[in-house]
Amino acid sequence: MNDIQFDTLIDSYLTNKVGIDKAFLSEKLSKGLQQNIIQLELDKTMTHAGIGNAKLKDSNQKMRGDKIAWLDKTNNNAFEQEFLAIAEEFITHLNNTCYTGINSYEFHYAVYEKGSFYKKHKDQFKTDNNRKFSFINYLNDDWLEADGGQLCLYQNDEIEKIQPHAKTAVFFKSDEMEHEVMLCNRSRMSISGWLKRI
Ligand code: OGA
Ligand code: MN
């Protein structure tokens, strides 16, 4: 991927704190990653986010209903490797142009089945401030307004709504941007990730 494409994301981020590129991933890569999620679902590899004791898990599920699986280079999946290579190029470009000092990252696939949502939250935990930027890539074809599942970003009494269309990428600062995933009326697929300084 070339630097000009990264600049679409970075320039819109610098303009209003929400980076958006509606044509970030290629059609082929988007389809390949979508297929990976479908397979992970069939294999029952996707698990509800939030592990630990049952009580914690239970309260977590009132907050968020997505199921996740982490990406890993050692999975030896061509699409997954291509995606992570793009993420690494993006990090290099971001560090070179914005002096962000990112030195680590993590990404997971996510599926929100019909009826799922993720209530308003920030991505940086009180106990862990390593997450500097959130970077989300959507993988849904033909998404309609009525399908719900919009990402709502809350900034100074304004709400920005983003449709989770395939190839759309969103980028924002993890510690300050409050956001929410609205109730999904159909299955919604994405890759969510964080650029970290550890
Ligand atoms: C998250 C999250 C938003 C989205 O995974 O923390 O807020 O639009 N995801 O999927
Ligand atoms: Mn989030």
Image: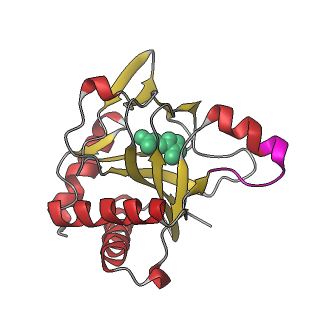
Give the magenta-colored segment's residue range: 49-56
Q: Is residue 169 visible?
A: yes
Q: Along the horizontal axis of the image, is 114 left or right of 55?
A: left
On screen, 45 above or below 136?
below
Residue drawn at (37%, 58%) of the image: 98
Quarter in which the N terminus is drawn:
bottom left
Q: Position of residue 123 (x, y in %)?
A: 57, 44
In the picture as drawn, the residue positioned furthest to the front comes out as: 42
Quarter in which the C terminus is drawn:
bottom right
Q: Along the horizontal axis of the image, is 197 left or right of 58?
A: left
Residue drawn at (49%, 66%) of the image: 102
Q: Position of residue 32 (x, y in %)?
A: 27, 67
Between residues 101 and 3, which one lies in front from this camera angle? 3
Q: Is residue 52 magenta?
A: yes
Residue drawn at (17%, 66%) of the image: 28
Residue drawn at (73%, 44%) of the image: 126
Q: Position of residue 76 (x, y in %)?
A: 41, 84
Q: Along the horizontal axis of the image, is 151 left or right of 130?
A: left
- The secondary structure making up most of the magenta span is loop
Q: Is residue 97 visible?
A: no
